[in-house]
Amino acid sequence: MAAETTGKVTFVGAGPGAADLLTFRAARAIAEADVVIWAASLVQEEVLEHARDDAEILDSATMSLEDVLVVYERAVRHGLRVARVHSGDPALWGGTQEQLDRCVELGLEVEIVPGVSAFSAVAAIAQRELTIPEVAQSVILTRLGGGKTPMPPGEEVREFARHGTTMALFLSAARSGQLAEELLEGGYPADTPVVIAYQATWPEELVRRCTIGTLEATVKEHKLWKHTLFLVGPALSASGTRSHLYHPGHFHGFRRADPASRRALREQGAQP
């Protein structure tokens, strides 16, 4: 009797689009795969240059979860390596958990390769740090309620907006008026800066700066309704603050503090 075979599924975070944002580990997983399932509408085709010439290439845009599971079941029977290539990072809005659970049930080996999320890609494009000392030290990743996937109670944009920190909002461009309204209801001033990015890192990339007060008009002017991410918060225009990490009065295991600078930090009420 032949021994049972098992395969492997690697969930690959391909980043926001640009193929050169793949990690080395992601490229290796694609290169080793017998089957590559990729999101053609969300990931640039250049990622497939890492695939073997004899690899089976499937477009997940044409597949339901059930279709994908058929491939995983085949991987179990024939000991195949599958690279399931998702946009961004698999941990965020990737529909990965339902696949992971099924892979475990099937007895498949599973690996997850993290990817660059669109929010960090947009911050890089905008050349902004999202956590500015004394302005914002948290980043909230969320989406507007009312779409295809209901939001759990307490996770409304207006509730998160009450923190006044940096927010990254996915999957919300189609209802830009509601988005602006909830941000204002949560307490952001109308002049709070916003970065709007469409197709970040793609050739069609469009990035615009505005405020919450002009957010809806900007979205409608450019006819944006999908593949769009919003960064919101005072950190997007703040300047003049300094991180204590590189202050001469701060010490750690690799650097001693300058005594005078350390006293100055203490007088400011900081924790050097």
Image: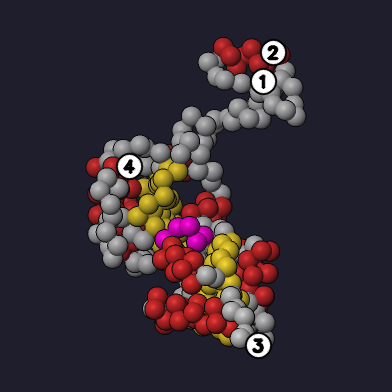
Residue visible at 37% across and 52% down in the picture: 142
Q: Mark 1 points at which residue?
A: 249
Q: What element carries label 4?
A: helix
Query: Which residue type does callout 3 highlight?
Result: Asp
Marks 4 and 3, Cα distance to the nearest angstrom?
Answer: 50 Å
Residue visible at 27% across and 59% down in the picture: 150
Along the line of sight, which residue is nearer the eye, 182 or 237?
Answer: 182
Query: Which residue type does callout 2 highlight?
Result: Ala
Q: Tag 1 or tag 2, which sits nearer the N-term?
A: 1
**Does 43 sit left or right of 253 as displayed?**
left
Residues at discs 3 and 1 in contact (Cβ within 8 Å): no
Query: Where's residue 8, x and y in %?
Result: 59, 72
- The label number, if any, that marks residue 260 in the structure image: 2
Query: Where's residue 134, x and y in %?
Result: 48, 29
Marks 4 and 2, Cα distance to the nearest angstrom?
Answer: 40 Å
Q: Is 141 situated above or below 244?
A: below
Does residue 237 appear anywhere in the picture?
no
Q: Tag 2 or tag 4, which sits nearer the N-term?
A: 4
Query: Which region is colored magenta?
Result: 89-94
Q: How many marks?
A: 4
Marks 3 and 1, Cα distance to the nearest angstrom?
Answer: 59 Å
Q: Is 70 situated above or below 161?
A: below
Q: Name the residue under label 4.
A: 161
For residue 147: magenta? no
Q: Tag 3 or tag 4, which sits nearer the N-term?
A: 3
Q: What element carries label 3?
A: loop
Residues at discs 2 and 1 in contact (Cβ within 8 Å): yes
Residue visible at 74% across and 22% down in the picture: 256
- The label number, if any, that marks residue 263 in the structure image: none
Query: Which residue type does callout 1 highlight?
Result: Gly
Along the line of sight, which residue is nearer the eye, 12 or 173?
Answer: 12
**Does 198 sit left or right of 253 as displayed?**
left
